[in-house]
Image: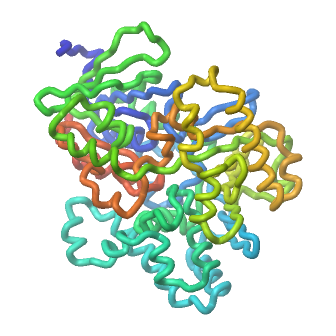
Amino acid sequence: MEKTSDSNQFDAIVIGSGIGGLTIAAILAKLNCRKVLILEQHFVLGGFTHEFERQHKFKWDVGLHYVGEMGKGEIGRAVSDYITDGKLEWQQMPDPFEQFVYPDLTFAQSCHPEKFKADLIEAFPEENQGIERYFADLKTIALSDRVPPILRPLYDLVFSRPKKMARLTTKEYLDRTFKNTRLKALLASQWGTYGLPPSESSFYIHAVVTYSFLKGGWYPVGGAGEIAKQIIPIVERKGGKALTQRQVTEIIIDKNVARGVKVKQTDKNDAPSEEYYAPAIISDTGAFNTYTKLIPDNEAIASYREEIQAFPKGHSALTLYLGFRESPAKLGFRGENHWLYHDCDHDRAFREQSAAPDRVINACYLSFASLKDPKATAHTGQIIVFVDYEFFSQWQDKPWHRREREYYELKETITHNILDFVEARYPGFKEAIEYCELSTPLTLAYFDRSDRGAIYGIPGVPARLDQKWLAVKTPIKNLYLTGTDVASLGTVVKIWYQVAVVENLEVTVKE
């Protein structure tokens, strides 16, 4: 083993700079006065919170479109203020902040939970009792998700209902609780925030994510890139650092104890391998990458590998990045999100769209970062369409510059289809666009190193809740997981869950 020195020895190493990795690094730096190293394979820090720019004016975030529970005094805001020294500002979205659009129904969700519930009851009075039960169940499950790990066994013993509901799919729960097809579709409208249509998703995860948005949505002032910008100085202040274009190729393990990592520079093919050491290695790259790619052959995790590879795969997405000639406000948009649907059957719509996105667009999510960010200098928007990876897999092994003309023509066709879908609902939309660019699941897989471009990692199906390999602690001493795969989906949940990660670290607190 390479002899360590001050330059390659740290108190903790975090693999990946997504919101989970950044949060745990900041908490360790502040709470335990630790020297933390963050390693990021991309040339920009932030994971799905990073931003990119085109034409020197249009700027987009790639994954953080809105966050719940960021009001003063709320749990997400408390953690956010702690890890950024209160320097990260949050702008609340307008009320209503969600617009659900169906052919025969348009419904606006208020950022006041009681008004949201009252509006649903007014629209569906015959479902009054079910709506009351639904809101109660959202709260019960969401609060159960925040029970400290040490109290979880006792909580599950006393309160059985959350555990029973967790085994239901969202569709099963909605079918048991409601009769009205339109209401069931309406309550599942935000399924894109956790990446699975109703027949696949765990109602537990639906409840956790939906509850986090009951008081509205928030957006970071200055854009999503501000998150990394405000956190990194806190890490550096304690002697830590964040390195980009550093891909971890192996976690160094000696006698079943994680000692460090091997790293290659992604921008220098001939550069020698680097090694860094620490008594705590924290992976923010997901369970799939950690167990199947970064750990050498190890009997302790052999069964984990098999189970992860056999587990259902998550869905991916197309994202159309838009730059506008003038403010979308002239078309009536105010900064709220728009969820547009062809009909009320989310599952069928997704299957058809995923099988042939070049011919069928049934649903999309539309948002305008520039209307949410008071510091935006040019107007931008994004349209997200959920699809599977398979349709694009024939081009996965070819570098960008060698993909056939057919691939780029396909992207152009899909772009037109998406814009036509939105234009049919908002006339004049296409005319307002100055610039557009489409990313595919191949883009996500390349930049995020995710399995098949699955933007939410291990999918939130009911079986996810029973997997022992989705835990902070691993069978390898001093190796831990953080991020989406060890928390319920949703940005605010991932931020809050890092406190639990810190509690699990079995290393001595540095005085």
Relative horizontal placement of residue 183, taking residue 37 as reference (left or right): right
User: Picture coordinates of residue 343 (x, y %)?
Assistant: 69, 69
Above/below status of 114 relative to 460: below
- Residue closer to the observer: 78 or 141: 141
**Residue drawn at 60 percent across, 50 percent down:** 65
- Total marks shown come to 0
Q: Residue furthest left?
A: 255
The N terminus: image quadrant: top left
User: Picture coordinates of residue 352 (x, y %)?
Assistant: 63, 58
**Residue drawn at 88 percent across, 46 percent down:** 431
User: Picture coordinates of residue 14 (x, y %)?
Assistant: 34, 33
**Residue drawn at 27 percent across, 61 percent down:** 148
Relative horizontal placement of residue 229, taking residue 468 as reference (left or right): right
User: Picture coordinates of residue 239 (x, y %)?
Assistant: 34, 25
- Residue closer to the observer: 401 or 274: 401
Residue 507 visible in this rendered orientation of the protein? no
- Residue closer to the observer: 482 or 237: 482
The C terminus: image quadrant: top left
